[in-house]
Amino acid sequence: MAKTSSINRNEKRRKMAKLAEGKRKRLKALIKNKQTPMEERFSAVLKLAAEPRNSAKNRIRNRCEVTGRPRAYYRKLKMSRIALRELASLGLIPGMVKSSW
């Protein structure tokens, strides 16, 4: 099980990213648009830099919903390989059987 603080920090990042998503998109569109004046684009860059770093979407770490493990994460199932194997062995995931030969 992962540290509770790291799980909570990641959840905080998810909430911040969701709240700031629209504002960040508008600023990035303004920066990328070559038709806007240079001064306006530069002020948009400064505003974007002033935003909290944790509001950026790429700061979010994919973590297992069951254990909080950050590695060996299956996006489709939102869990790590270890948690997936345990649940499959217990028969809690429909249609999944642990292979043996």
Image (spheres, helix red, strand yellow):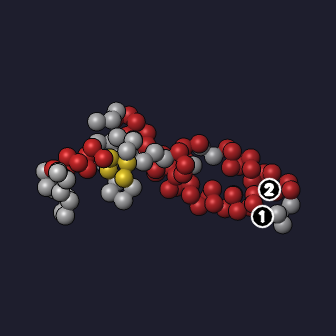
The residue depicted at 39 percent of the width and 41 percent of the height is: 70
User: Badge 2: how crowded within 10 Å, few (<14), some, or many (20+)?
Assistant: many
The residue depicted at 39 percent of the width and 55 percent of the height is: 75
On screen, residue 67 above or below 93: above
Q: Which residue is mark 2?
A: 41
In terms of secondary structure, where does tag 2 sit?
Answer: helix
User: Badge 1: how crowded within 10 Å, few (<14), some, or many (20+)?
Assistant: few
Residue 72 vs residue 62, the one in the foreground: 72
Q: Which residue is mark 1?
A: 33
Inspect the image, locate mark 2, and give the three-letter code of the amino acid beneath it: Arg
On screen, residue 63 above or below 36: above
The image position of residue 58, as x and y in percent, is: 55, 49
The residue depicted at 34 percent of the width and 33 percent of the height is: 3
Whether label 2 touches label 1, CB < 8 Å = yes
The residue depicted at 34 percent of the width and 40 percent of the height is: 69
Residue at mark 2 to residue at mark 1: CA–CA distance: 8 Å
38 sits to left or right of 83: right
33 sits to left or right of 28: right
Residue 57 appears in view: yes
53 sits to left or right of 92: right
